[in-house]
Image (cartoon, coloured by chain):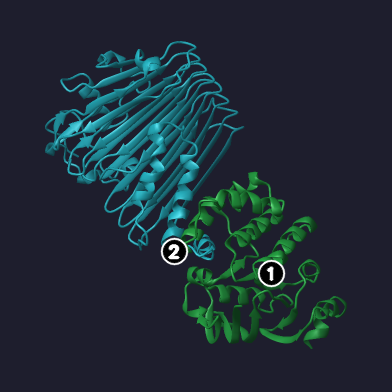
Chain colours: A green, B cyan
Amino acid sequence: MSTLKIENLVAGIPGKQILNGINLTLSSGEVHAIMGPNGAGKSTLSGVVMGKPGYVVHSGSVTLDGEDLLALPAWQRAQAGLHLIMQYPTEVPGVHLDDVIREAYASRGRNTSTLDAEIVAEAARIHFDMALVERSMNVDLSGGEKKRNETLQLALLKPKFAILDELDSGLDIDALRDCARRVEAATQEDNLGVLVITHYARLLEELRPDVVHILAAGKIVKSGGPELADELETTGYAGLTQ
Amino acid sequence: MSSTAHYPGVVLPTAEEEIWRYSRIEELSLDSFVAGSVENRVDAPADVAGIVVQGAAVGECGIAMPIPVDAFAEINAIHCSGAHADIITVKTARGKSYASPIVITRTLSISGVLAAPRLIIDAAENSEVTVVEHFLSADDISSLIAPVVEIRAAQSARVTYIAINELGNKTWKIAHQQSLGERDSTTRLFTVALGGDYARVRTEARLVGIGATTQQVALYFADKTQMHDFRTLQTHIAPRTSSDLLFKGAVQDTAKSVYTGLIRIEHEAHGSQAYQTNRNLTLSHGAWAESVPNLEIETNDVKCSHASTVGPIDDEQRFYLESRGIHPDIAERLVVLGFFNEVLERLPQIDVVSGLRAKVAAKLHAGAQ
């Protein structure tokens, strides 16, 4: 059992504070959703926790089983067991998925001898065409294909915790179901803990959260069970954040 | 401007001239070299052995460059008719496709010489051939090589030429590639430059027959104090001709690179298309790359585009790979090799090419800033 703990996190970009004291504790196997209107700080939270350049942390802490993640560069946070599925996955021309996963395995001291077979099996599981897997990373892929590619990497790397930053944005219904179900399965098979950041409740119909947090103006203003997402559908953010 | 002792009448250019701008020509003193030669090795399997002639006569010269285009082409022409003549010809038979590549290795093994070998590829109608010219010298060889390759592709001929520069870090190279494409021919000029102290290539594809096609593709990677210098010309003379150029380079440490390219569409060349892309990665703060694309279009009804970029590795790409747990040095290596893959994937998959990716990787020193 692992724990990802965010305590009193105050952060932003240079000259602008965006997160105003976030507290959240996520355990292995749990799914927590963070929902919020545009500008609430959702993407900032994922960037700060993963260590994306360009953010400034003013105070607070993020720990994984007690290890201070904020003191580590992004690649060491990933090795500690954190994974980020990006809202807009970056194109890396000429670099192929198997190159990346092979290096990522090697950096974790994992055996790569069965990697090719693992990629084929995982791609089949989320209905991701191998012809697309063999393309340059995220180059000439549709929105749905990019998110399948991201989900494939998550499935192969088997982190302890994953942050899904708007996995559902730009996703067709089939891709949404394939990706969400694969993540859901990982919570059971690999005891993955998931922080789902989303604007809409539809993702949460496939990936059922244990806890829903409402983020507004850089603070979690309300937390509750899955029913909170349903409530949000009827009242909208305005009703919950006032 | 000064005449040289060894080549009376030859006047070296200066960096004042646009086509020599940014070059290191001012550092060159021809007086410090004596005329000399390279050692040649020709690997031509049985099916191509008969079409290669070493020690060909000076009369063979001029099929694509009848008049030397600059002082170094002129020096090469002087060598061709003198004691250090080194002319290799490849002449194909009409209608014949040769499966095996011809690999010519030119090795400079003594310091203080100026060698000026010439390669002439004369592809007859509807024939197909691949020729590799591989330039080598040891790191301590302080010499100058001024090679010229002339290529004529007759009607419907397909010629692939690959120049590989793995010269030592004290050797200078000032090279010329000149091709002439006749009706419906296809000429591909590839250059891979890893070596040399100052290594320059002027490459001109002239499309003189209706429907001729050319590709000019290069990978260059300079480190330490190396400088790579490319001047490209895509010259469309006949109608409905097409040219495509992709040059990708990287500079590391305090290395430099220059790319200047000109697409020229002449008055009669209507219905032509020409594309030119030059991309450069600066991998260290002290490295420098210049890219200057140019267009000169004298007719309507043409499609042209050019794109050029110079800059460091994209932060987003680096972060994406790092977020997978990959060490920054390895992430950088993946991005650079990925950048060059676009060129490597276009090269014919033959033995001498297959080792190039590893050579590029070996040259990348991790974490250079």
The amino acid sitting under disc 2 is Pro
Given residues B288 and B302, the one toward you in this image is: B288
Task: Tell me which chain the residue with mark 1 is part of.
Answer: A
Q: Could you tell me how far apart the alpha carbons at marks 1 and 2 are, in whole angstroms?
A: 29 Å
Label 1 belongs to which residue?
A187
Judge from the rendering whether residue A70 lies leftward or rightward of residue B60; answer left or right. Answer: right
Residue B274: quadrant of the picture: top right
Q: Label 2's element? A: helix
Q: Residues within 10 Å of mark 1 (few under 14, many from 20)?
A: many
Residue A189: quadrant of the picture: bottom right
Q: Name the residue at 48% across, 45% down.
A: B341
Q: Position of residue B241 (x, y in %)?
A: 55, 27
Q: Name the residue at 64% across, 76% down.
A: A28
- Please determine if labels 1 and 2 lie on a single subunit: no
Q: Label 1's element? A: helix
Residue B249 is at least partly visible in this image: yes
Q: Name the residue at 48% across, 49% down.
A: B339
Residue B174: quadrant of the picture: top left
Where the N terminus of chain A falls, by quadrant?
bottom right
> Residue extending furthest right?
A234
Judge from the rendering whether residue B252 lies leftward or rightward of residue A160; answer left or right. Answer: left
The amino acid sitting under disc 1 is Thr
Given residues B156 and A197, the one toward you in this image is: A197
Q: Residues within 10 Å of mark 2 (few under 14, many from 20)?
A: some
Q: Position of residue B87 (x, y in %)?
A: 27, 20
Q: Name the residue at 51% across, 59% down.
A: A105
Label 2 belongs to which residue?
B328
Q: Is residue A100 above or below residue A216?
A: above
Task: Tell me which chain the residue with mark 2 is part of.
Answer: B
> Residue extending furthest top?
B94
Question: In this rendering, which labeled residue sits more in front, label 1 or label 2?
Answer: 1
